[in-house]
Every structure is written in C-alpha cells, then in structure tokens.
Amino acid sequence: MENPIEQCPKCGCSEIGKGRQAPQAGVFPLGKIIPISSVIIHRICTNCGYVIESYVENPSKFKG
C-alpha cells in the first residue's frame, strides 16, 4: 500500500523518489536462529532529502 503523502511535509515539494538502502544496512528479525535480512525502502523528497517513509521490502520475514 502506498503512502497517501504526495508532498513533502518539510518543504512542500511534490517530487517524491524511492531509494533502496544498501544490503549491509538491512533489518534482521530478532530471535530467529538464522536471521535473514530484508532491504529497507525509503520514500525521499527529491528537493530537500527529507525521508518521508521507510519500510522493509519483505515483511513476511518478521512473522513468528
């Protein structure tokens, strides 16, 4: 589901880009015997660089 924010709350720019965080900085689930990370996706204002939203690419890795 996409975030309804289509404008930067900091500067008002309406050009929002997406970026993928480097694999070394992925998120690992706690308590798993073999932790497998998930990449973090960011929605970023292309004008001021404000990070509007961040989420993991594969949320199912964090179940049970």
Image (cartoon, rainbow, N blue to C red):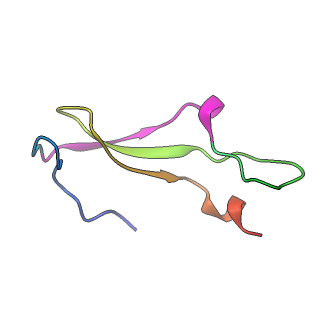
- Could you tell me which residue is drawn at 17 percent across and 32 percent down? 47
Q: Nearer the viewer, residue 33 or 22?
A: 33
Residue 45 x %, y %? 24, 40
31 up-or-down from 4: above or below: above
Q: Which residues are magenta?
A: 14-26
Q: Nearer the viewer, residue 14 or 33?
A: 33
Q: Magenta stretch: residue 44 in it?
A: no
| Left or right of 11, for residue 64 | right
Q: Is residue 10 left or right of residue 19?
A: left
Describe residue 57's horizontal placement relative to residue 33 as left or right: left
Residue at the location (75% across, 53% down)? 30
Image coordinates of residue 17 in percent, x first then y, are 29, 42
Counting every numbered tag in the picture gives 0
Q: Is residue 40 above or below residue 47?
A: below
> Viewed as shown, does residue 35 lie left or right of 44?
right
Is residue 25 found inside the magenta-colored segment of the image? Answer: yes
Identify the residue at image location x=61%, y=57%.
58
> Residue at the location (61% across, 61% down)?
59
Residue 44 x/y as whole percent: 30, 41
Q: Quadrant of residue 31?
A: bottom right
For residue 9, above or below residue 59: above
Quadrant occupied by the N terminus: bottom left
* Residue occupying the far left of the picture: 12
Image quadrant where one finds the C terminus: bottom right
Residue 12 at x, y = what percent? 9, 46
